[in-house]
Image: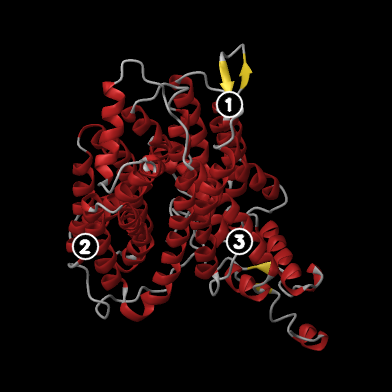
Amino acid sequence: MMNGVDKMASKDKFSTMSLDDAMMLAGFGTYNILHMLMSGVILMGMIMQSLALGYILPAAQCDLSLTLQQRGWLAAIPFLAIILTSYFWGWLADTQGRRPVMLFSMIISAVFSVFASFSPDIISFGVLQFISAIFMAGSSAVVYTYLGEFNNLRHRDKMVAFGSSFVGIGTVILPCVSWLILPQEFAFPISFLDIYYRPWRLLIVACAIPFALASVLLLFAPESPKFLFATGQHADALEVVKKIYAVNNRAPAEEFPVKSLSTGNFLYKASDSKGIAAIWNSMKEQTIPLFKMPLVPWTLLTCFVQFGIFATTNGFYVWFPSILNSLANHDGGETKICDVLDASKAAAANGTDVICDDTMNTATFERSIYIGLVFCSMYIIVGFLVDFVGKKLILLTILSVTGLCGICAHLAYNQQLAVVLFAVFQMSGACIGLMNAVAVELFPTKFRAMAICLSMMMGRVGSMVGSNLIGMFLETNCGAGFYLFGGILIVNAICCLTLPAKKTIQPSKMINVESTQNQTHEPV
């Protein structure tokens, strides 16, 4: 910490400075940690809203008269909304600002989630959930950028990584909240809607609470200094940096030595074309080269691998509570997962007057919490190992092992072993970040953001396709689903053999991070 004499001596030296240098001078501390926690709450709300239907739909199947295929379509709604609207939200955040886009989208998403909790039938439920998911996608497309732009270059990656860990925390909190709410037995009649307000409806509202809390916190947060600077609001950007400095150093903002921000190396340039034409030209310039040599093999590889990982992880996760619940309710001897599921379907088919059972066994929530904890730990383990053994070896190992575990989970007769294998099967999701890191090194800086955005979009297509295919397989041929998606992960591992070895991947050059173009779509 500089004393008063040093500050005065360096006043002229620091009077004008680039935004990145000013951020470095503002330091790292309390402000950055609090901002990361707020962003983490947004990420936690996003993952809870995306995956909550896995717990809600089994409990709502009687009230809404849902078949397995209908549950598959409903579970795919959040992923479909993200696929359809991510580019729009990214463009809107680049033109209108990160903070207003997130604030507006989270409030509207939470409001429509509350409306969805009063849905009397499947049509209204699906429509309201889709509208809520569209606005949920707004924060999904922007939050990583908003988090990164409040940290200097030295600490940015670390803080984004810590913020991302809230995704794993969300997979633990979601079954905890479900365990607290779903076993309750209240049913309040609402006559004008002809419904009973039961626990699954309350769970929809509970999963929107993180967005409501984050909206309140965001009211007290400023706009991103990078966006303010990019749009010519240099004085406002400097005020934000001063605030970061004041909180981190516990000093008055007036003591910050930088009095103005220089624009000499700034690369942002407004496009001559406007509106849709500007968006189309930008996307075309950055997308077409990805499908030409020498980049097209890497484009196809990253898209296919992300498709397989998302289809397996998210596709099965939305059915995970249903499968665990069927296993927990099974009273017979040792048998395979699919035999338990087929037996429950056969019992329903043979009955002439079947009573719908939408109760959730408490063992389902307990096992889901354990698996969420393992999922969180996988991120930490991969983070420690990646610098020692390299991304390629980790990808090969995790994808091949999880693929084999998926196949073996179908073949195992011991229920506990089957659940463990099934849990390991879900751990392929830890490779999503690794594939993004590989893409950073495979693609030139100019096309890197679009390449990652494209591969992540294909991954979300995989989530939607996977959840529907798995629902169809559970209805017709349960074992085929495990063989198909386990096999896809093994094929993904084989494809990763073509990746350059650790020593041959050239380190990427320093990226100029001042431009806001494409930064809102996906985290690099």
Query: Most extreme residue toward the top, as rendered?
Result: 192
**Residue that badge 2 annotates:** 493
Q: Which mark is residue 36?
A: 3
Q: Secondary structure at mark 1?
A: helix
Q: Earlier in the sequence, mark 3 or mark 2?
A: 3
Q: Is residue 411 placed above or below 476 in the rendered structure?
A: below
Q: Nearer the viewer, residue 132 or 176?
A: 176
Q: Amino acid at mark 3?
A: Met
Task: Using the image, determine if residue 115 lies above or below residue 448.
Answer: above
Q: Secondary structure at mark 3?
A: helix
Where residue 304 appears, x then y in whole percent? 24, 52
Which structural element holds mark 2?
Answer: helix
Ranked by sequence position, the earlier of labels 1 and 3 is 3
Crowd rating for badge 3 (residues with CA inside 10 Å; few <14, some 14–19, many 20+): many
Q: Residue at x 35, y 59 (%)?
A: 427
| Res. 285 in view | no
**Quadrant of the image occupied by residue 239:** bottom right
